[in-house]
Image: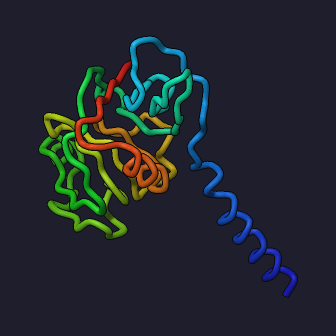
């Protein structure tokens, strides 16, 4: 009986602690040239910043492109989607044999997670994940991967047309 209580307490503690690791932080941000409302992704830091202005930004932990899949440049948010469906790009199909051709949004196997902010050109998105343990690593085919709670938060703070600057 004591073991059951101990395991239950551990499980509750783990569940209660998880959101703290996923929370956005308000931090000092003095990088010149980025206006309020701009999203800045620093690949080397594996961090995304939503510039607030006045030397501040919201900072999120993100997963970024793995070796050979990283990029840098300026894009804009082109489309916002909640519970997006996913179909793997040709590159993913080539490199991951047996990957599903289509995954319905809102299902546990969907790698886009809770929401997606698709960037101009349609090749990349800032999105949630069904693999939260991958956030913070060099893990993707070029997309920016966030905890689901963080992408939902960011989704509500930005609109179509928001600039996205990705730097190494």
Residue drawn where x is 23% and y is 36% of the image: 161
Compared to residue 35, the image places residue 125 above or below, namely below
Display coloring = rainbow
In the visual, does 22 lie left or right of 144?
Answer: right
Q: Quadrant of residue 107?
A: bottom left
Residue 105 % position (x, y) = 26, 65
Depth order, front residue of 144/116: 116
Residue 1 % position (x, y) = 84, 88
Residue drawn where x is 63% and y is 57% of the image: 18
In the visual, does 129 lie left or right of 143?
Answer: right
Residue placed farthest to the right in the image?
2
Depth order, front residue of 15/151: 151
Residue 154 % position (x, y) = 42, 46
The quarter of the rendered structure image containing the C terminus is top left
Compared to residue 64, the image places residue 18 above or below, namely below
Residue drawn where x is 53% and y is 36% of the image: 58
Residue placed farthest to the bottom in the image?
1
Depth order, front residue of 38/107: 38
Depth order, front residue of 21/57: 57
């Amino acid at each position: 009986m004591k073991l059951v209580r101990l395991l239950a307490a551990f499980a509750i503690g783990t569940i209660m602690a998880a959101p703290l690791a996923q929370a956005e932080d308000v931090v000092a941000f003095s990088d010149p040239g980025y206006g309020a409302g701009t999203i800045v992704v620093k690949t080397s830091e594996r961090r995304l910043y939503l510039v607030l202005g006045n030397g501040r930004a919201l900072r999120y932990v993100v997963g970024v492109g793995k070796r050979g899949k990283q990029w840098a440049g300026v894009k804009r948010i082109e489309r916002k989607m909640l519970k997006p469906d996913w179909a793997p790009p040709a590159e993913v199909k080539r490199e991951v044999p047996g990957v599903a051709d289509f995954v319905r949004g809102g299902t546990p196997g969907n790698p886009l997670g809770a929401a997606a902010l698709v960037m101009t050109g349609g090749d990349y998105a800032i999105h949630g994940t069904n693999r939260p343990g991958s956030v913070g690593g060099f893990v993707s085919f070029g997309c920016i991967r966030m905890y689901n709670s963080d992408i939902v938060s960011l989704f509500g703070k930005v609109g179509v047309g928001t600039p996205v600057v990705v730097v190494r």
